[in-house]
């Protein structure tokens, strides 16, 4: 793994660890709070916590040459981004967390954590089928392993045979909704991840809390409420910001591949915090999940490709893909340093180098291109 790829991977690995810890922590909170109310509080904690972080970031930022306004290190959402944001909010902010909470009530936290690997499967399938991301044999093999492992975890002894666990099906359903949402968010991943996270958290959490009241779920005590809000901020909010930041660098399929380590962090936390004893299905599925995650994280992609003329706005530094000017005397060699955001133009160019399907490499792939260099 190159230094650049390791740097790109670190934020998503940290996001995975934070999100993985949410399963056992939520399992504990469900003893004192209803599932819909908990889903709402988790997302409210996520939204308001990140909104505060964003306000602190913008207040402490200084105006740099070449930026349009104070705090403009990140691109703001525009009108064309709203359909993607609304679709993402509908899936991830409203239904996915509630399905997960109901699934956790009927499923061991360690099993639920591993089942969340289906988010990787859904993300990869949709990224390849709907958005044309390059996916090679290594990735498809990993998807097959994760699918088999998920089916194993979904079955439970039931008299003369095996029956499908309702809790497991709900967890898998939540994972598929998040996988779909990952691909919708991919379209706006170049915009401010803190702004996207705070909007999704506050709106989605508010809806879930209102629905909880309508369903007659009782209000939790102050300490339980504070614990739920804090868990939402740390495990959902910080994780979501890091995930969105990685989407712009790695693309949906590869970001999700690294995020596949989240279930293992959650399973370990469940054993330590909840003292769960792993079932036989868990022991069978674990090595399949491990091999699948390793295959996803180690695939490589490189070929000659062409960049078409493009005009857009996003956070960037001056690198080989950003050689534009910021006025007299301000180009990539002097004047503007560090990350900043503004509308800029990319001229058409052709070259070859290892790359991810980031905001500048979402090109098509003909049959002559090898998707997995390591195959």
Image: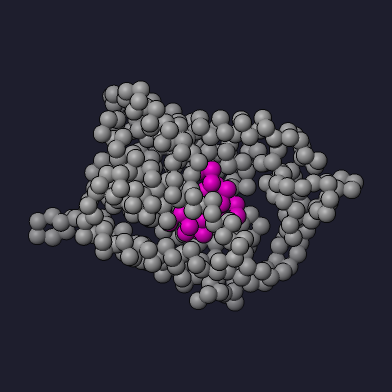
At 74% from the left and 57% from the top, the residue drawn is: 319
Q: Is residue 256 above or below residue 213?
A: below
Q: Tell me if 109 is positioned left or right of 70 in this view.
A: left
Q: Which residues are magenta?
A: 240-260
* Residue 127 visible in image: no
Q: Is residue 152 above or below residue 244?
A: below
Q: Tell me if 62 is positioned left or right of 211 in this view.
A: right
* Quadrant of residue 141 within the rendered picture: bottom left
Magenta stretch: helix, strand or loop mostly: helix
- What colour scheme was applied to this rendering of the protein? one colour
> Is residue 24 rendered magenta in the image?
no
In the picture as drawn, the residue positioned furthest to the front comes out as 272
Give percent across and percent down for residue 336: 80, 46
Looking at the picture, tell me which residue is in the foreground, 16 or 327: 16
Position of the N terminus, as image quadrant, is: bottom right
* Residue 220 visible in image: yes
Q: Is residue 58 above or below residue 367?
A: above
């Amino acid at each position: 793994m190159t230094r650049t790829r390791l740097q790109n991977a670190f934020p998503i690995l940290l996001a995975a660890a934070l999100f993985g810890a949410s399963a056992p922590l939520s399992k504990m909170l469900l003893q004192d709070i209803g599932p819909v109310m908990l889903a709402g509080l988790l997302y409210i904690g996520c939204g308001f916590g990140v909104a505060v972080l964003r306000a602190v970031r913008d207040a402490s930022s200084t105006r740099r040459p070449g930026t349009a306004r104070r705090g403009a290190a990140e691109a703001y959402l525009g009108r064309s981004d709203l359909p993607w944001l609304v679709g993402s909010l509908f899936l991830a902010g409203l239904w996915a967390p509630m399905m997960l909470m109901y699934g956790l009530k009927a499923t061991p936290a360690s099993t639920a954590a591993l089942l969340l690997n289906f988010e990787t499967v859904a993300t990869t399938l949709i990224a390849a089928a709907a958005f044309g991301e390059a996916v090679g044999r290594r990735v498809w093999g990993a998807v097959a392993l994760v699918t088999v492992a998920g089916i194993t975890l979904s079955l439970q002894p039931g008299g003369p045979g095996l029956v499908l666990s309702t809790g497991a099906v709900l967890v898998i359903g939540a994972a598929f909704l998040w996988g779909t949402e990952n691909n919708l968010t991919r379209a706006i991943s170049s915009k401010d991840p803190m702004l996207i996270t705070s909007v999704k958290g506050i709106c989605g959490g508010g809806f879930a809390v209102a629905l909880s009241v309508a369903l007659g779920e009782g209000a939790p005590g102050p300490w339980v409420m504070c614990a739920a809000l804090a868990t939402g901020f740390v495990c959902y909010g910080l994780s979501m910001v890091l995930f969105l930041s990685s989407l712009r660098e790695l693309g949906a399929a590869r970001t999700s591949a690294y995020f596949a380590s989240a279930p293992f962090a959650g399973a370990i936390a469940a054993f330590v915090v909840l003292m769960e004893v792993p079932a036989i299905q868990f022991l069978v599925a674990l090595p399949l999940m491990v091999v699948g995650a390793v295959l996803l994280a180690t695939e490589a992609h490189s070929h000659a490709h062409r960049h078409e003329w493009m005009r857009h706005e996003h956070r960037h530094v001056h690198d080989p893909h950003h050689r534009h000017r910021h006025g007299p005397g301000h180009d990539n060699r002097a004047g503007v340093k560090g990350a900043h955001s503004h509308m800029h133009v990319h001229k058409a160019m052709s070259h070859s180098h290892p790359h991810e399907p980031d905001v500048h490499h979402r090109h098509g792939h003909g049959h002559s291109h090898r998707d997995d260099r390591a195959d």
